[in-house]
Image: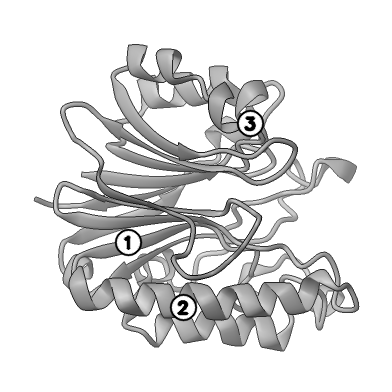
Amino acid sequence: MQFATWNVNSLKVRLPQVLQWLADSPVDVLALQELKLDQDKFPLEEIEAAGFRAAWYGQKTYNGVALLVRAPLALEDVVLGIPGYDDPQRRVITATVGGVRVIGAYCVNGEAIDSEKYPYKLEWYAKLTEFVRDELTRHPQLVLMGDFNIAPADADVYDPAAWQDKVLCSVPERAAFTALLELGLTDSFRHFHPDEVAYSWWDYRMMMFRRNLGLRIDHVLISDALKVRATDCVIDKVPRKWERPSDHAPVVLTVTG
């Protein structure tokens, strides 16, 4: 099986790329972020015509997440949002697929260290961590994937000095990421590629992608029970080269069984 995550930065704009990538890739489960669509605007007909089933949690302008699974796989026990957390932003969707608990997340950006959105980010991460801890008690086989809006280490940043103490790279944010790992999760890309210089997001401006000046902020975290089945995790940069691309690239985990 293959599990993938992709921040598409508007599904309405990027639907042709998503359908093309699904046709070209053997992915079985795809978590999408930044749908930027109301719940009733989701392109279910096109997704189903491509051979996929879907669950989604839409929100116009910003946010919105979805899980797509290749038929005949099914989405079971779907949960929208973080239970018990009154959050107006639609950022999390969870379902069981083929015996694996899949959590797709579009984590808060935070905007800037001195922004009012920064404390919200840290609070949101604390709530996500509580939710994942609870899910792990009932679902040993678990994957948490999405746009985390955190570069976990200096190795995940094209210019660590320039980004030091900036949003996405600050010490409290990286501590929040570490807290998730301490639940018993593994950063699957770093597990398989401990020394590789690789990014999943590049700013549209200043030819950042062409110059490969990016950040690794899209992650696939896996439980210990799923890690023993995992064989690789890669960042697929090909869609970032297409016309009108998302500023993010898909991240793909492969597992056996």
Specify few, some or many for label 2: CA neighbours under 10 Å numbering under 14, 14-19, or 20 or more: many
User: Which one is earlier in the sequence, the residue at label 2 or at label 1?
Assistant: 2
Is 73 situated left or right of 236 in this image?
Answer: left
115 shown above or below 249: below
Is 236 situated left or right of 233 in this image?
Answer: right
Q: CA distance from mark 2 to mark 1?
A: 13 Å
Q: Secondary structure at mark 2?
A: helix
106 shown above or below 168: above
Residue 193 seen in render: yes
Percent across and percent down for residue 112 are 86, 70
Name which residue type carries label 2: Thr
Residue at image x 41%, y 73%? Answer: 131
Residue 169 seen in render: no
Q: Which residue is mark 1?
A: 143
Q: Secondary structure at mark 1?
A: strand
Name which residue type carries label 3: Leu
Quarter in which the N terminus is drawn:
top left
Residue at image x 63%, y 42%? Answer: 34
20 shown above or below 64: above
- Residue depth check, mark 2 versus mark 1: number of the one nearer the observer: 2
Asked if marks 3 and 1 touch (Cβ < 8 Å), the reply is no
Q: Which residue is mark 2?
A: 129
Q: CA distance from mark 3 to mark 2?
A: 26 Å
Percent across and percent down for residue 168 are 72, 70
Percent across and percent down for residue 20 are 46, 19
Residue at image x 67%, y 30%? Answer: 245
User: Which one is earlier in the sequence, the residue at label 3 or at label 1?
Assistant: 3
Percent across and percent down for residue 160 are 76, 76
Q: Which residue is mark 3?
A: 37
Q: How many marks?
A: 3
